[in-house]
Image: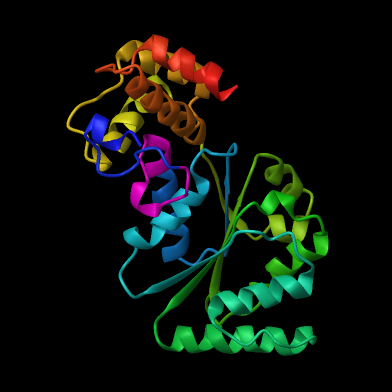
Amino acid sequence: MYLNYWGLHSPPFVNAPNGNLLFLSPQHEEALSRLKYVLQYRKGVVMISGEVGCGKTTLVRAMPHHLPEGRYRVHLIPNPALTPIDLIRSVLMQFGGNAESDSKAILLDRVQKILKTRASQGIETVLAIDEAHVIAENATLDELRMLLNIQSEEEFLITLVLLGQPPLLTRISQLHPLNERVSMKIRIDPLDLVQTGRYILYRLRQAGAGRGIFSKEAVLDILEIAGGIPLRINNICDRSLLIGMMEKSSLVTRKIVRTARVDLG
């Protein structure tokens, strides 16, 4: 609606976790480096925690762009609140396998065959579990751990990436067999003032903007309102661009941002 007004070719502040729009703040860049290390050396399990909207899923979706082409298959299960057997079925479907069976033994055998076939072809498998903190059954989490038992004589045939909000850390720490398999714990913190400004500018440039559009004072208020969380920054910036257009402003000012905050409720 406001794209032509601000000289943009696409919406700059969409909230879908698009890997092509990963903003590499220092903490996101470090998280990506740590993640690549775990994958390269097949360390088993890595946990990525942070508040909702901090960029965990976007990081995982961007991961294939930062890995050797053709070497990795990255799969993401977005809703893991499943029974153990349904989780295995979901994994199989992600892998492109046949999930039609009520036998856990048969399903796991199919998973194993896929992983071994890929390994023989030099392809490594990464399974990311989004929103892992919502898994209610310990048995489901334990089933994830058991996937690591599918291995060659020297290394795991799958790397697990557990994504979740901070309560996930406490939950996993209480499950000792799984916690002992976690080789890396990565936390993504909110953006600071400098990074908030750079994030907004990055998103605008990706959408075709030739200038900053937001005043420095507006960015200060956006940080205060959003707390450095990219999802919240997107919401307030998107509404601010709409209001700025409606007011025929040439710049998103602090006044516009505060109006957007009220408008968002």
Vertical relation: 143 (above or below) 55: below
Of 127 and 20, nearer the camera is: 20
Q: Is residue 238 left or right of residue 48?
A: left
Vertical relation: 223 (above or below) 166: above
Q: Would residue 262 be counted in the magenta stretch?
A: no
Of 196 and 35, nearer the camera is: 196
Q: What's the residue at 40%, 87% (across, down)?
A: 121
Q: What's the residue at 74%, 59% (across, down)?
A: 81
Quadrant hosting residue 145: bottom right
Instruction: Give the percent coordinates (x, y) of residue 60.
Output: 47, 55
- Does any portion of residue 161 appear in the rendered image? yes
Vertical relation: 124 (above or below) 105: above
Q: Would residue 25 be counted in the magenta stretch?
A: yes
Quadrant hosting residue 151: bottom right
Q: How is the image coloured?
A: rainbow
Count numbered badges in the picture: 0
- Does any portion of residue 194 appear in the rendered image? no
Which stretch is magenta? 15-29
Q: What's the residue at 43%, 17% (across, down)?
A: 257
Q: Is residue 68 left or right of residue 226?
A: left
Instruction: Give the percent coordinates (x, y) of residue 56.
Output: 51, 46
Q: What's the residue at 33%, 75% (across, down)?
A: 70
Q: Quadrant of the N terminus?
A: top left
Instruction: Give the percent coordinates (x, y) of residue 113.
Output: 58, 89
